[in-house]
Amino acid sequence: MDFQIKQTLQQKLDAINEFLHEEIYPLEKLFLYHKWDELFPSLEQCREKVKTLGLWAPNLPKDTGGSYSGLLDLALIGEVLGQSPLGHYIFGCQAPDAGNAELLHLFGTVRQKEQWLLPLVKGEIRSCFAMTEPHTAGSNPTLLDSTAELKNGQWHINGRKWFTTSAEGSSFAIAMVVTDENTEKHKRASMIIVPTETKGFNIIRNISVMGEEGRGYFSHAEVEFDNCIVPQENLIGQRGSGFALAQERLGPGRIQHCMRWLGIGERCINISKQFMKKRKISSTQVLAQQPLMQAQIAESLAELAAARLMVLQTAWGIEQNGFEQSKNMISLIKFHTANVVQRVIDRSLQSLGALGMTDDTVVSFFYREERAARIYDGADEVHKIVAAREFLKN
């Protein structure tokens, strides 16, 4: 594995980092204090600037309107963008749109690409992904019970989903629903495009997460499909391929999540550093001179560095050998990096004292939001079992 970063990529990373400091960080106050009416227009202005810089949608190929140059490159870009909760959105590579766009690019029909993929890549519309259900185990998609019945060339969809991220304001959902109840468990479900304006697509609520409902892109909805009818041609891929498509969607997404978490950890350490070097604890000393605080910083630096190597090795392995050969490493980095970032954020918050509990810095937001890192895209326990079983089997 070559650790040297290409000069062209380093220039791109430097440009993204500069953009973060000059354009994105100043907007975080609006975000943290929920000044949505001021925030959203500013985000759109930033997105247009990113497009003019040629840095838009680094997760998608250039022939679709993106700027993708390789998974390893994307991982390093994701690390930089992860330093702000606004980073991925402003650069057009945010979940769930990124995963939905990748699905449509790989498996969508010509019509689906023209109607949904192209405007999604351009940032003209948003989408959501409806898989998780409140009453079934999210870690086992084979248990889903939302259904789609094919009648006279149309899918009749019924069921309830939740944690449908960014449903509010989305133009369409990709719904994972059961289309064949009596077949083999990994072939029961399919993925179907559902325009959100369709009768029977009902947003029940934006779920309050750690005391915050959010708005628009920055929200998680509970959604009801009440005899929601869409054309048969809205099926993505083959009937019964939902589970396989989910793995295609979530696998690369976990690389991006892990690198984003590393960016979050780095941002939190730097906030701690700036604070501790100025925070007086006596007439002659600042907090940064305390050996205990130095030890905690060292622990965070070491844990982030080790996790970073694991994630980059996994991304490199996927590029060399394909996703199938790297599934075990993906499980390892998913639970390991999620726990690392949680510990790093916690230490950073502790170092800030009372300030850490406020929204005057972004650390408290990361503390609340990224607790979910150990749950979404597969809970820690599931990934540990998968990794151990694969090791013992082979």
Image: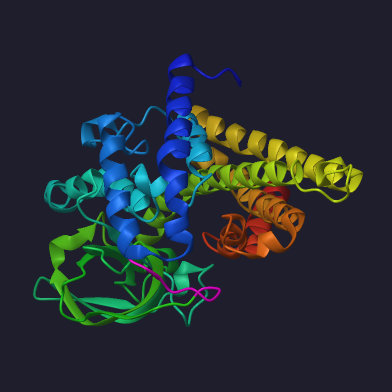
| Quadrant location of the C terminus in the rendered image | top right
Closer to the camera, 374 or 213?
A: 213
Residue farthest front in this picture: 283
Closer to the camera, 29 or 60?
A: 29
Q: Residue 255, position in %: x, y? A: 52, 43
On the picture, is 279 further left or further right than 260?
right
Q: Residue 393, position in %: x, y? A: 69, 50
Closer to the camera, 308 or 52?
A: 52
Q: Residue 165, position in %: x, y? A: 39, 65
Residue farthest left in this picture: 152
Res. 133 image quadrant:
bottom left
Residue visible at 51% across and 68% down in the picture = 140
Residue visible at 63% across and 57% down in the picture = 383
Q: Give the range drawn in magenta.
A: 209-216
Residue visible at 14% across and 61% down in the picture = 233
Residue 85, compared with residue 57, is above or below; it is: below
Residue 369, compared with residue 347, is above or below; it is: below
Q: Is residue 67 visible?
A: yes
In magenta segment, residue 79: no
